[in-house]
Amino acid sequence: MPEAVLQAMHRASPNIYGTELVELANSLYPDLQKVACTSGDAVIYIGNGHSAWEASLTNTLSRGDTVLAIVTGRFTLGWIDIAEAIGINVEAMDFGSDSTVDGDRLRQTLDDDKSHRYKAVLMVQTDTASSVNNDVLAVRSALDAVDHPALLMVDCIASLGCEEYRMDDWGVDVTVAACQKGLMTPAGLSFTFIGDKAWQAHAKADLKTAYWDWDRRVNGKIFYQKFCGTPPTHHLFGLRTALDILFEEGLDNVWQRHRNLARVVWACVDQWATDGDVRCNIKNIDNRSVAVTTVQTGTMDADRLRQWCEQQYGVILGVGLALEDVYADMPANLFRIGHMGHLNVPMLMGTLVAIDAGFKALDYPHGSGALEHASRTIANLSAA
């Protein structure tokens, strides 16, 4: 998170009924729409990404409805848990821990649903456990190919502001996101973006509750109703500054920066993979997320490496999120490198140096010259 975002939040509590806060909050909605590339209404919730999952379901579905959930890691499973807890039937299509959606298989499943039992298809763009990047447009194409009316709901919690995403152009009906990753603001806000077809479903949904209800928040007559109570004042100040920083760089430039930095990470990890058991969890480079990279370490203790990096250099690597308890053939030893949000080359290279030093200090087998490959990638991208 940029220092400017934290500084924006470091201020006295404002008058929650005053003009300044109302104008600031109202300025956020059109800019959030720009980030998601949509004209659909944006809603801000006080909560983490799980809250947006629940809001997306309660506003569009009814008890006993069935949804199809695309699983490519761990995070759709969390969405499934919430759906089942509120009375929605879920059928999961699991594509494994290291691959993306198979469009042909999905299309056949949708075609077989002649009675249109599936009211929605749930998917994540980036699964932060597996670090796969799913092709949202391919899923939309599968729905259109068989003229299936299900809503397309996409979790962009780990990808919004990092990965290219075009809600309207790609035919997404509901987008869920949060502030703490690509939007560079401390965790505490989540968002839903609402397409026209989702509003139509909202009119018939019987799971709506007062707190999550889109209508109260979008069409409420007073500012207080946008947040169903007291607004998250300081998060709004931070988010305003984060969006300003993002637009100053330019959204296309932000996406390109994430693509470039991801290639630096992959060049390094793929070189480590030339000796020993270290490798990217996602083999196909076209299916890798530009926001996060999950690294397998085989028989080597990834937690020991994480502890070494934190204790020696204060570099905190992501935990493996226990994919092995979902996939029997998935190795238990994983760590993750986040390369999202407020990030540049010196910051990223410092992280890669710490990991490389950790491999050496712990005598973990790994390919040599990884940092050279990373720096060469930087040079080539700079010259392009």
Image: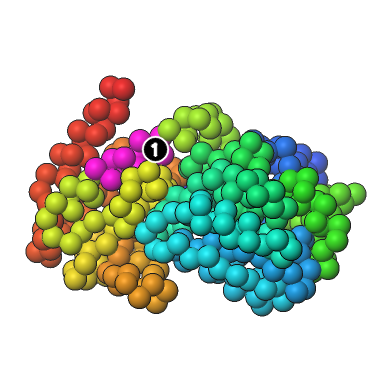
Q: Looking at the image, is 20 positioned above or below residue 314? A: above
Where residue 311 sits: x, y (%)?
Answer: 24, 64
Task: Name the residue tied to disc 1.
Answer: 259
Where residue 158 sits: x, y (%)?
Answer: 50, 52
Q: Quadrant of residue 54?
A: bottom right
Where residue 285 sits: x, y (%)?
Answer: 33, 45
Q: Quadrant of the C terminus?
A: top left
Q: Looking at the image, is 163 positioned above or below residue 320? A: above
Q: Quadrant of residue 137?
A: top right
Q: Is residue 182 left or right of residue 364?
A: right
Element at label 1 = helix
Residue appearing at x 45%, y 62% in the figure: 95
Residue stretch rendered in magenta on the structure? 257-267
Residue appearing at x 40%, y 48% in the figure: 287
Residue appearing at x 66%, y 77% in the figure: 85
Circle 1 Cα neighbour tier, 10 Å, few/some/many (<14 / 14–19 / ≥20): some
